[in-house]
Image (cartoon, rainbow, N blue to C red):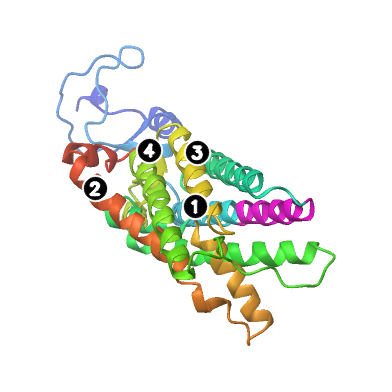
Amino acid sequence: MNNHLYPSVDEQTRFLSDPTSYYGTYPATIEPIYRPPLIGKDSYRPQIVLRPSNSFPSDTSSKAVTCLSASLSIISPLMAEFVSVFVTLFVFNHLDTELAVMHTASLNRSSILALTHAVCFAVFASAFKTVHLSPAVTLTHLLTGSTSQLFCLLIVPTQFLAGFLAVIANVNLRSASSLPPPPSLKHDLSIPWTNAAYQLIISQMIGSFLICSSHVSSFGVRREDDNHNGFILSRFRISALLNPAVPLFLATAIASFLSLIQSSVPCCPLQAFSLCAYRFVDNFADHSFTSHHIYWIGPIVGSLLACAICKFLLSPKYFMDRNSDI
């Protein structure tokens, strides 16, 4: 019997206890395949080599890490969306109230509010990378395929809830107990209300087109494939900011200014919905929702136009590169 082909008991113990070594089996016979010397003059090691001894994870810990990773990948973007919408609308409502108290001129008031709204959009988009801040933007990402349907169904209710709570927080901070003013149109009395509504719809449609186009060009798919939770994350795919938020800032500033010079709300239907919802909850006889739909037509049509035009103008390779894993 060739004893030099079989490791001793002490050598086996030392070999198996080493965390950087490899587990091996020791059959009755071992083929004398040449291997470079590893320790001393030994030229042979077990030929059946398995995984490293420190690479066998515990089933319990592996499942816990998988569940935690999948949960954070889903909850984190939703929490970022909630915080972004809440802070943006709260700052807008608070600043709007203070400017009204100071009797600021209408043009200056619209300019300040539009700039503030654009800054909030750009800051949160740069900080969290995944926020939409508007249902119209979410619709664009849904139609372009950059965000999965399941995630869009979760993002939109999150936006509504954050906007409603922002209005509640702003009202509770004020000393007066009066209801917040409903969304309204700014138009000359010589112009019929219907014509003013059409002008607002066209202005918001153009503004929404600018915002949604900047999102399509600046965002790409964020997919975190993993051996354990890749299937889950692929079902909850969400886009992320790839380029600087300068186009988004400029588009939001122009869109909000176009909307604010003709109405009391920016080019984001969440503001109008939140005000009307709060007034309706406080007083069911309130008729704020009667003309609420005019603040949704422009953003939705602009979102559809942005999706259609960008699909035709941008090459298919552009969308393939944007929708690849990052």
User: Where's the C terminus, which quadrant?
Assistant: top left
**At 38% across and 41% down in the image, what residue appears?**
214
Q: Which residues are magenta?
A: 86-102
Q: CA distance from mark 4 to mark 2?
A: 16 Å
Do we see residue 145 in this rendering? no
Mark 3 vs 2, N-terminal side: 3
Mark 2 or mark 1: which is in front? 2
Question: The residue under label 2 is which amino acid type?
Answer: Ile
User: What residue does disc 2 label?
Assistant: 309
Residue 77 marker = 1
Q: CA distance from mark 1 to mark 4?
A: 17 Å
Closer to the camera in the image, 185 or 23: 185
Mark 4 or mark 2: which is in front? 2
Decide whether residue 75 is among the magenta residues: no
User: What residue does disc 3 label?
Assistant: 249
Instruction: Determine whether label 3 and label 2 are within 8 Å by CB.
Output: no
Question: The residue under label 4 is which amino acid type?
Answer: Ser
Mark 1 vs 4, N-terminal side: 1
How many discs appear? 4
User: What residue does disc 4 label?
Assistant: 218
Identify the element where label 2 is drawn: helix
